[in-house]
Amino acid sequence: MPNPKRRHSKARRDKRRAHDALAAPALSECPNCHEAKAPHRVCPRCGYYKGKQLINV
């Protein structure tokens, strides 16, 4: 098996890790109760989605 002849520099290592940061979750406002919720999901506070109540809360 081939092994690396030279070690990778810190700059090369850090350039590879530049895209590993966690992104904040996307949030949208519920048009019914104005709470923050995940987009395209039923609101966990009021149970509404697209103007209809889908779950009883």
Image (cartoon, rainbow, N blue to C red):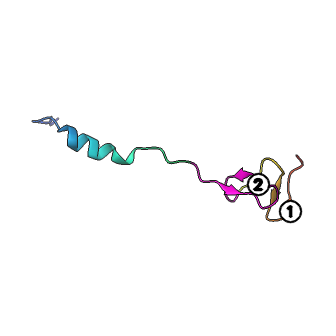
According to the picture, the residue beneath numbered tag 1 turns out to be: 52
Residue farthest toward the bottom in the current orientation of the protein: 51
Q: Residue at x 37, y 48 (%)?
A: 19
Query: Which of the two residues, 2 or 48, is positioned nearer the viewer here?
Result: 48
* Magenta residues, dominant SS class: loop
How many labels sit on residues?
A: 2
Query: Can you tell which mark lies on residue 42?
Result: 2
**Which quarter shows the N terminus?**
top left
Element at label 1: strand
Which residue sits at x=86%, y=51%?
A: 55
Residue 44 screen position, x and y as percent: 78, 47
Q: Nearer the viewer, residue 45 or 2?
A: 45
Q: Amino acid at mark 2?
A: Val
Specify the quadrant of the image occupied by residue 11: top left
> Where residue 31 sits in the image (x, y, percent)?
78, 61
Q: Amino acid at mark 1?
A: Lys
* The stretch drawn in magenta includes residue 27: yes
Q: Where does the magenta region start and end?
A: 25-40
Give above or below for 5 relative to 21. Answer: above
